Image (cartoon, rainbow, N blue to C red):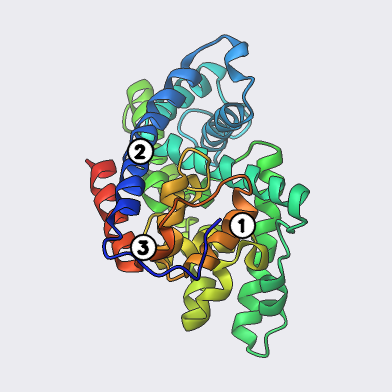
Amino acid sequence: MMDHNRQPPADAMPVEAVLREDLAHGDIVLGTIGPILGHLLAQHDNSLFSDEIVARVRGMVADVARQVLRAPGDPGQSAQQEPDTAAEAQLTAELSGNIHFLVHCHAQALEYQLAKRLEQRSGIDPVLSPLMQALIASDDQATASAAMTLLAAQARFMQQQRRMELPINELPADLYHFVLTSWRTMAGHEQGDTPEAADAEQRLRITYDEGNSRAGLLSRIVSSLGAGISAALSVSHAGVALFASALAAASRQDRDLTVIATNDSQLARLALALRAAGLNPKEVEEQFVYLHPEVALPEGFEFLRGDRAAGLLAASGRRVAG
């Protein structure tokens, strides 16, 4: 661990070089997530699904396909019919071909796995964290009400993940659009672009409200914290869900990417995100005690400025996007 009484050297760049190299390696890993998951999900050998994360992702993709095919007014079936298993397999395969969709499912699975691990290892409640309790007890009625709504959404998330489910209304707007477009295209190829198909899609779109999804509620709570966001940057105090949303907002990263950064293949990204979010080196070290207790931060990390950490993350973001 770090000696915080040391004086900074004249040149603190060596630690940046180490972190930049580790981050570049992490970027390569990030680029393989979608293609590897897509390859595994396309296989029919059940031995390939022994890994919990892959199995969970596969379950979520199939669940989304089932929900759409069972939607009221689905152009591919009457109200009394169960969806065609061939259609379900076809739509599942279509959804599995989208890397962004798979990465989102992967992040959901990783978040659930992390929440369970921290509950077992450190006693951190995956639903009712100390910060959530404080928000629910707030004198501000709007804050307390939003926190209660989020509490219910978080409890549902944990239950749904246990069942390997992903409600379509919990998807980000771009992925919700992708799912409905894939379904509509598939139905159109089979039956033609009918008024019934358009009506069914419209009904689904009307029910969608990204702001009331769990991610939307988390973002709203984090925004309401204002300068008090530092309280949510402690995973033991905030719980995994609020911690991930706060870290994403404070480090200006996508939430799914922030969740993935908690994985042991992304240690440099996590350390840089925490530093870029405004945590001092000692506070970063404290978060690593919970998230990766076996890992020591690199020598010289205490001299890395927050703006330099943000710059390294921004450069990484351009590589990942490219």
Name the residue carrying label 2.
181
Please give the label number shown on residue 288: none
Q: How crowded is mark 2: few (under 14 residues within 10 Å), some or many (20 or more)?
A: few
In primary-sequence order, the first of circles 2 and 1 is 2
- Residue that protrudes farthest toward the top in the picture: 45
Q: Nearer the viewer, mark 2 or mark 1?
A: 1
- Residue that protrudes farthest toward the bottom in the picture: 139
**Residue at (72% x, 71% y) in the render:** 130
Task: Identify whether 164 is placed above or below 55.
Answer: below
The span from disc 1 to disc 3 (Cα, nearest Å) is 25 Å
Task: Identify whether 316 is placed above or below 274.
Answer: above
Task: Identify whether 107 is placed above or below 1.
Answer: above
Q: In terms of depth relative to the viewer, which is nearer, 237 or 208?
A: 237
Name the residue carrying label 1.
240
Residue 49 in view, yes or no? yes
Give the x, y percent position of residue 21: 32, 41
Relative to 16, 61 lies left or right = right
The span from disc 2 to disc 3 (Cα, nearest Å) is 45 Å
Q: What element carries label 2?
A: helix
Q: Residues within 10 Å of mark 1 (few under 14, many from 20)?
A: many
The amino acid on which the numbered mark 3 sits, given as a three-letter code, is Leu
The amino acid on which the numbered mark 2 sits, given as a three-letter code, is Thr
In primary-sequence order, the first of circles 2 and 3 is 2
